[in-house]
Image (cartoon, helix red, strand yellow):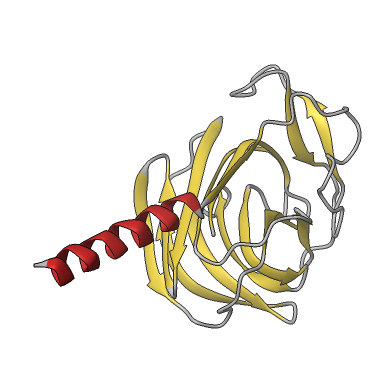
Amino acid sequence: MRKLLVFLGVALLAATLGVQSKVVRMWSFDADKTDAIPPGFTNAVGEWKVVADNTAPSKPNVLAQRGKSERTTFNVTLIRDTNYKDVDISVKMKAVAGQMDQGGGVVWRAKDAKNYYIARYNPLEDNYRVYKVKDGKRTQLQSADIKRTDGWHTLRVTMQDDHIQGYYDGKKYLDCKDSTFKDAGKVGLWTKADAQTHFDDLTVSGK
């Protein structure tokens, strides 16, 4: 009986420590200076800056990708002081403009601007997809069809070990496995080509 109680005590302590080890962070961009990159974010590829948006889920500011890059360019901003392996990441996103591409998504387990996982929604293609980008080359892992509706939408992705799940406005559309990037890495945001997109209320939890 004593051994059982000791075991249960250790298990409870481990579970408690596991919960406490999770780090939860949120960026609303509302206190950040407009027309500039938010503190801690990189302007790795594209033109990322804080702008005012009176439609924002949390007013007054959002983070916008304003650049018009070439067709094959992946616009990426990474958060310098993030380092997550198992992660739960969500963001509110609004497609603003783009003829070659629109929309965007979230990046995680990023080593740099050429190596990461990305889950993105493209309203021009009516789909939500998860990819891995290795040495700048993108490989699709899974795709789901979603009909376009304008305005703000919520993208959420979780990854535990090699298991990826992707949600759009609270409904799960993506469920796949991949082990290309096994280590912790940075999180960030992403668009492609000339996709101009607004992002708000970026939330990350994990360890």
For residue 46, what is the image quadrant? bottom right
Residue 155 place in picture, x, y as percent: 50, 46
Going by the image, does 40 lie left or right of 35? left
Q: Which residue of the protein is positioned furthest toward the left in this rendering?
A: 1
Residue 154 place in picture, x, y as percent: 50, 39
Does residue 203 appear in the picture of this structure? yes
Going by the image, does 140 lie left or right of 43? left
Which residue: 55% across, 79% down? Answer: 182
Which residue: 56% across, 83% down? Answer: 180
For residue 27, what is the image quadrant? top right
Going by the image, does 148 lie left or right of 133? left
Residue 34 place in picture, x, y as percent: 87, 27
Placement of 7 over or under 17, stated as above or below: below
For residue 38, what is the image quadrant? top right
Which residue: 50% across, 82% down? Answer: 179
Does residue 126 appear in the picture of this structure? no
* Towards the viewer: 3 or 67: 3
Q: Which residue of the protein is positioned furthest toward the right in this rendering?
A: 36
Residue 60 place in picture, x, y as percent: 72, 18
Which residue: 70% across, 16% down? Answer: 54
Going by the image, does 178 lie left or right of 68? left
* Towards the viewer: 41 or 76: 41
Placement of 193 over or under 92, stated as above or below: below
